[in-house]
Image (tube, rainbow, N blue to C red):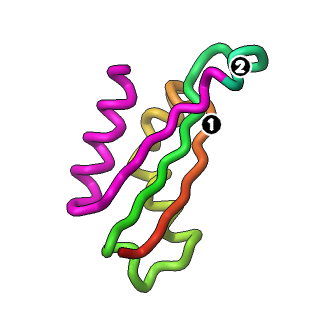
Amino acid sequence: MVLLSAIQQKLSQALPGAKIEIIDHSASHIEHHPVGVHLEVQITYAGFAGKSLMEQHRLVNDILAEELKSGQIHALRIKTKVS
């Protein structure tokens, strides 16, 4: 999917050296919301060191703000870890 590739690239550029996994849960939610994807991002990144969980998640949300605002991403589950 083009959108997932674009999100992967955007996160990789903003978080250099991060290990990023994107899981698409959209198929499980098609009945209640057919527009926009339901994603889970799992990110392991040294740059998260010293940041609270809220700060880590806010950073990811800020990176993907355009996709969230436009509705391309309907739901986003974020899992972060310091490498």
Task: Name the residue: 39% across, 81% down.
Answer: 49
Which image quadrant for residue 22? top left
Marks 1 and 2: CB-CB under 8 Å? Answer: yes
Task: Name the residue: 26% across, 50% down.
Answer: 12
Task: Name the residue: 49% across, 64% down.
Answer: 80
Residue furthest bottom as drawn: 50
**Element on which disc 1 rests:** strand
Q: Residue 76: x percent and y percent?
A: 58, 42
Find disc 1 in the rendering and name its residue.
75
Residue 49 is left or right of residue 25, and the answer is left
Which image quadrant for residue 3? top left
Find disc 2 in the rendering and name its residue.
33
Task: Name the residue: 63% across, 21% down.
Answer: 27
Q: Residues within 10 Å of mark 2 (few under 14, many from 20)?
A: few
Between residue 26 and residue 50, name the one nearer to us. 26
* Vertical relation: 55 (above or below) 72: below
Position of the N terminus, as image quadrant, is top left
| Of pointers 1 and 2, the one earlier in the residue sequence | 2
In magenta segment, residue 23: yes
Q: Residue 83: x percent and y percent?
A: 35, 75
Q: Amino acid at mark 2?
A: His
**Element on which disc 2 rests:** loop
Magenta-highlighted residues: 1-27
Q: Residues within 10 Å of mark 1 (few under 14, many from 20)?
A: some
Q: Residue 74: x percent and y percent?
A: 61, 30
Cα separation, mark 1 vs mark 2, equals: 10 Å
Which image quadrant for residue 66? top left
* Vertical relation: 67 (above or below) 2: below
Q: Amino acid at mark 1?
A: Ala
In magenta segment, residue 75: no
Q: Residue 70: x percent and y percent?
A: 50, 27
* Vertical relation: 39 (above or below) 13: above
